[in-house]
Image (tube, rainbow, N blue to C red):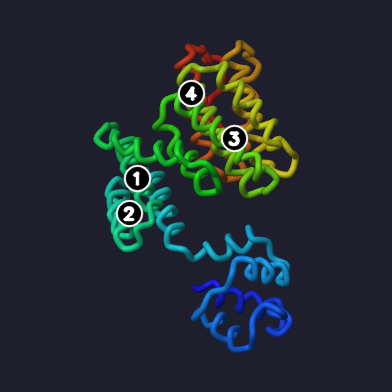
Amino acid sequence: MKIGELIRELRVQKNLRANVLYKDLLSRPAIVKFERGESDTTAEKFLEMLDHLNITLEEFSIIYNDGNKDLDYRRKYVEAFYNRDVGALYSVAVQVENEYKLTSNHKFLHYRSLILLLIDDLRGTEEHLNEIELLQDYLMNCESWGYYEITLFANSLSFYSIELIDLVFERAKTTLQRYQNLTRYRNEIALMIFNILEKKITCKDVAGAKIYLAELENIKVSVVDNMYMQTMIKFFSAIIALIDGDRTKNKAILQIIEVFSLLELKLKATQCQEFYEKVTSIYHLNNKEDNFSY
């Protein structure tokens, strides 16, 4: 759908007449062409239209992107990865490569690289390690990050070294702070830091993990308006405290896993359980007295 067509749809939904929305912006003939998707407008006029519609740019982006094929590709490869379907991942890799050939948009090359790395992860191979360079070069040379860069880094950082993760995060921090008051960005930044925490902990960089746990405070994620985020912060805090020797945190960790299970977040409960067991193995924590079932 063209932007003008979507603007018309939103205008009708809000029962707003064309002569009100486009007053001093477009002529009557220009309105007809714009709402048919036959012409575009300037960025300045577009922002005024959103203001008249009482819609933020972020809200419009979510509505507009809901039907975008690149988001569909992302859903496909995420679903295939969690289903451990290597064949489906290869299929999506071919699709995004063809999309790049049609559009020359490098994000589709990024998707392809990420998918091939996920295939290696599932198969336990290193056939596509060179794909890491494409992703890290883009992120390192990107002077201004947005939602796309945040999600790309969060989804691919498990393939980077600890040192590179620190370097890229420091490079991006200033830009990330610009968006910290937007819920969508704040949540993605939190998810990114959760991934970094998992990497730091499994690599036995506990001191580094504590720094990133503090980053959650610095970027104002630790607010009470998001139960999932708060629960995950408590989970990682308890994991780090357990590593530091506080054995009472075993019970707290298992309670958090049970909460996810009761809320029917089965995948998240399983992921947290597996991570907990991995931590107890890596750090040689004896939990025979604890009940791992939930």
Q: Give percent across and percent down for residue 184.
A: 62, 49
Disc with the residue nearer the chain's start (2 vs 1): 2
Mark pair 4, 2: CA separation: 32 Å
Mark pair 1, 3: CA separation: 26 Å
**Helix, strand or loop status at disc 4:** helix
Q: Which mark is residue 222?
A: none
| Amino acid type, callout 3 | Lys
The residue identified by callout 3 is 173
The residue identified by callout 2 is 92
Disc with the residue nearer the chain's start (3 vs 2): 2
Q: Nearer the viewer, mark 1 or mark 3?
A: 3
Whether residue 114 is situated above or below residue 208 in the rendered picture: below
**Helix, strand or loop status at disc 3:** helix
- Left or right of residue 265, residue 131 in this image: left
Mark pair 1, 4: CA separation: 27 Å
Q: Nearer the viewer, mark 3 or mark 2?
A: 3
